Image (cartoon, rainbow, N blue to C red):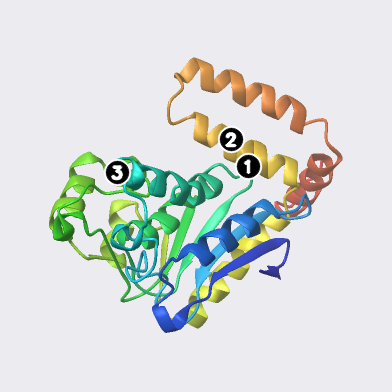
């Protein structure tokens, strides 16, 4: 892990294996996310080398053929453990951003990116699932995560056909938030995102993320109520009072 403004950057660092997940990387990711401190306002997840992640490493005990467990439930036990990393990312109270530096595929690779709140990508990268090729069901939460941004029809199409979604098209689907021409441009955009989030108090950033998440399932009346409660708190903060003055000054007006 390293720092970027008040953001923590977590890097998938097995470039020789295209950042494919193995048992050691899983534990390191879980430890890294658990260690995120109260001074961190956002988390950036990215990959090293030319890919974001090739998914699960099929030559390790992460894959069923290499698991020494005769129980009919061995596959479920294995995935229950692997899926902890998806919940660890998705359940973070602070904003999370996947900086997709190259292809992201399979449950393990694309799942990590989709578990984040936002996705910035380098042009030419592709996103895809593999269950149709392996005659299995999609895992790592993609059956839930993708359809919430792209719709159930597109999610099913990706899962059944293995369609390699160009990030440029993913931008129109809502799967990707920003596409940048090269790695340097994406890194500059990630820096700008980190600076923006870092300019907010951690409390307000957490509340904003919570409120937006609630809007996916609440009624309008319920959403208006939680917005009023949250802003009722925010209006009393010193951070709001300072930001209000600065904002009005930029508009050329003072109150």
The residue to which callout 2 is attached is 210
* For the residues bearing labels 1 and 2, Cβ distance under 8 angstroms: yes
Q: Is residue 50 visible?
A: no
Residue bearing the label numbered 3: 143
Q: Secondary structure at mark 2?
A: helix
Location of the C terminus (image quadrant): top right
Q: Is residue 178 above or below residue 93?
A: below
Choose top left, top right, bottom left or bottom right for residue 148: top left
Circle 3: element type: helix
Residue 248: image location, x then y, percent: 75, 47
CA distance for labels 1 and 3: 22 Å
Whether residue 43 sits left or right of residue 126 in the image: it is right
**Count of residue discs:** 3
How far is disc 3 from disc 2 in space, using C-alphas?
22 Å
Label 3 environment density (alpha carbons within 10 Å; few <14, some 14–19, many ≥20): some
Left or right of residue 255, residue 207 in this image: left
Disc number lying in front (3 or 2): 3
Give me the C-alpha separation between circle 1 and circle 2.
7 Å
Q: Residue 169's spot in the image, x, y percent?
A: 26, 62
Q: Which residue is mark 1?
A: 93
């Amino acid at each position: 892990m390293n720092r970027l403004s008040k953001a923590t950057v977590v890097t998938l660092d097995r470039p020789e294996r295209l950042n494919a997940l193995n048992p050691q990387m899983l534990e390191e990711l879980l430890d890294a996310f658990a260690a995120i401190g109260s001074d961190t306002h956002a988390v950036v997840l990215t990959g090293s080398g030319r890919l974001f992640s090739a998914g699960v490493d099929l030559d390790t005990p992460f894959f069923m053929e290499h698991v020494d467990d005769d129980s009919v439930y061995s596959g479920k036990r294995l995935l229950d453990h692997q899926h902890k990393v998806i919940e660890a990312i998705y359940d973070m109270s602070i904003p999370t951003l996947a900086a997709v530096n190259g292809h992201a595929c399979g449950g393990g690779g694309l799942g990590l990116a989709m578990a984040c709140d936002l996705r910035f990508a380098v042009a030419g990268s592709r996103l895809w699932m593999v269950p149709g090729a392996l005659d299995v069901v999609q895992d790592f939460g993609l059956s839930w995560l993708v359809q919430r941004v792209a719709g159930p029809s597109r999610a099913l199409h990706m899962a059944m056909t293995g369609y390699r979604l160009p990030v440029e098209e993913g931008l129109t689907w809502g799967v990707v938030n920003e596409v940048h021409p090269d790695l340097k441009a994406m890194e500059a955009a990630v820096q700008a995102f980190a600076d923006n989030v870092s300019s907010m108090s951690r409390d307000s950033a957490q509340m904003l993320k919570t409120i937006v998440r609630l809007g996916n399932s609440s009624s309008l009346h319920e959403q208006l109520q939680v917005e009023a409660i949250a802003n009722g708190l925010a209006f009393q903060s010193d951070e709001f009072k300072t930001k209000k003055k600065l904002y009005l000054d930029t508009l050329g007006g003072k109150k």
